[in-house]
Amino acid sequence: MNPIEATEQVCNDTGATPPAIRISGISKSFLNGRHSIDVLKNVNLTVSPQTIVGLIGASGSGKSTLLNIISGILKPDGGQVCICGAISEEFNDWGSISYMFQDDRLLPWRTAIRNVEFALEAGSIAKKDRVRRSLQALELVELASFEESFPYQLSGGMRSRVALARSLVTEPRILLMDEPFSRLDAQTRALMHEELLRVHQLKQMTVVFVTHDVAEAVVLADQVAVMSARPGTIREVVEIKPPRPRDITQPELTSYIQRLRALI
C-alpha cells in the first residue's frame, strides 16, 4: 500500500459523520544549531465534532506545536492530519478554523469592533457585512456596548472577550486555543470559562485547547489528552464524565485532577 492510499484510508471514515480532526502518526523535529530535536513522535488523536478537548502535558511536550500542525501553520515531518474527513493538504475551507492565541494580540490603534473586523479583511466580504458580523460577534460575547473602545480602555477579561469575538466572527467549525486564559486572574478566568461554554453551547463548534492548568482542563473539556515528555505523544485520553457546568470542589472532579497530574 502506498502512502497516498494509506492516507485516504485514514481520512475516509465509514461513519456518516467524520471526526472533526483525526491526527495519525504525526512527528515533528526542529533544528537547534547542528542538532535535531524530536518534538512530536507518532501522535494519534481523534476529536469528535462539537466536543471540547483539552491538551495537557509538561512544558516542552509539543502541545503548541501540535496545535500549529492542526491549524496548518506548521507541516509535520511525518503522519497525517484530517479535517472533517479531508486530508489537510486538500482541505479548502481553512476559514472554518479559528485560532485564539495566548496573547490577545489586539491592535492598539483599532477599536474593539475594528479588531474583530480584522479577521474578515483578507476575504472578499463587503465592508458593511464585515461591520455587521463583527458587531454580532461582540454581542455574542456581551461586549456590544464597548464596540468603539480601544484596547487600553478595556480590562484583561474584556480584551480576552474581544479576542474570542475575533476568533468567532469567521463562524468557525473548529476553534483552536493556545492557553487563551493563562494571563488572567483566577476570577476573570472563571468568567471566561463560563463565556466559552456558553458560546460553545450556542454555536456547537469543536474546540481544542492547550493548557497547563489541569483544573481548567477538567472544568471545560469533554476529553483531556495527556501528552508525554518530549518527544511528545498522546499518553492517554481521559473522558471527563460529570455534566457541565462543573464545580472544581466536587470530589469527583478532584479525583480527575489527581489522575491527570499523575499522568503528566
Image (cartoon, grey):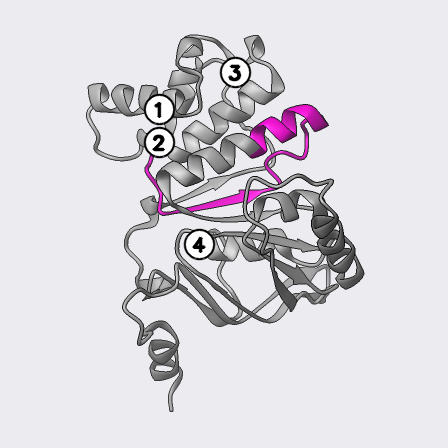
Q: Is residue 224 above or below residue 10?
A: above
Q: Residue at x 39, y 76 (%)?
A: 10
- Element class at badge 3: loop
Quarter of the picture containing the N terminus is: bottom left
Q: Earlier in the sequence, mark 2 or mark 1?
A: 1
Q: Are marks 2 and 1 in contact (CB under 8 Å)?
A: yes
Q: Which mark is residue 108?
A: 3
Distance CA(mark 4)–CA(mark 2): 19 Å
Residue 42 at x, y = what percent? 59, 74
Q: Is residue 228 above or below residue 149?
A: below
- Element class at badge 2: loop
Distance CA(mark 4)–CA(mark 1): 22 Å
- Element class at badge 4: loop
Identify residue type, mark 3. Pro
Identify residue type, mark 4. Gly
Distance CA(mark 2)–CA(mark 1): 8 Å
Pair 4/2: label in front: 2
Instruction: Check disc 1 and report the residue beneath it.
Output: 117
Pair 2/1: label in front: 2
